[in-house]
Image (spheres, rainbow, N blue to C red):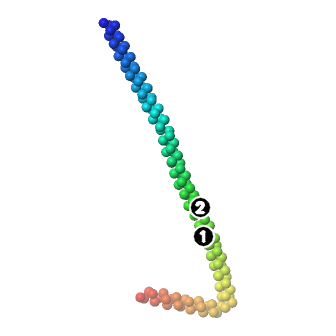
Amino acid sequence: MENSIDSKINAARDGVTQIGNNLRADAHAAIDKVADKVPPTTDRLANSAHNGIDKVADGVNKVADTMESASGRLIARSKQVGESYKALAESGRGRVRANPAISILLAAAAGYGLSKLLSSRGTK
């Protein structure tokens, strides 16, 4: 009888061991299947992320180039305006030096006209 119980215990142990081995093999197969699918998915996601970042960086570079170009034009225009102002100011100084009396009369008339214009706005 003991032999029969031992053989049943051994058979049960062998069955449980086989089930364990089968579960282990099935689990490894499932993990391998998932692992085979994860890298391509991960690679696709990483590539998509890299492409998105590249597009954003390209857009930022385009904006920076546009701003640089616009600021270059603005600087050139401001230099041109500054030079025009200097030439106009020098021309005005020359005329004031040539005709000081007329310049004083024109300045007084302009001041009087501005004071009347501004004072009439305040009384309305």
Task: Tell me which amino acid carries mark 2.
Answer: Asp
Any mark on residue 3, and which?
A: none
Q: Nearer the viewer, residue 67 or 62?
A: 62
Helix, strand or loop status at disc 1: helix
* Residue appearing at x 42%, y 22% in the figure: 21
Residue 53 percent coordinates (x, y) = 53, 51
Residue 112 percent coordinates (x, y) = 53, 91
Task: Tell me which amino acid carries mark 1.
Answer: Leu
Please indicate whether residue 73 sits to the left or right of residue 32 in the image.
right
Q: Nearer the viewer, residue 82 or 110?
A: 82
Residue 50 percent coordinates (x, y) = 53, 48
* Residue appearing at x 55%, y 52% in the figure: 54
Residue 3 percent coordinates (x, y) = 34, 7
Q: Nearer the viewer, residue 48 or 62?
A: 48
- Measure how far apart labels 2 and 1 are at the Cα level: 14 Å
Q: Residues within 10 Å of mark 1 (few under 14, many from 20)?
A: few
* Residue appearing at x 45%, y 29% in the figure: 28
- Report the number of numbered marks: 2
Which dot, 2 or 1, sits closer to the camera? 2
Above-or-below relation of 72 to 12: below
* Residue 12: quarter of image: top left
Q: Nearer the viewer, residue 42 or 113?
A: 42
Q: Residues within 10 Å of mark 2 (few under 14, many from 20)?
A: few
Q: Are marks 2 and 1 in contact (CB under 8 Å)?
A: no
Above-or-below relation of 66 to 121: above
Q: Earlier in the sequence, mark 2 or mark 1?
A: 2
* Residue 7: quarter of image: top left
Label 2 sits on residue: 65
Helix, strand or loop status at disc 2: helix
Please indicate whether residue 99 sits to the left or right of residue 2 in the image.
right
Any mark on residue 74, and which?
A: 1
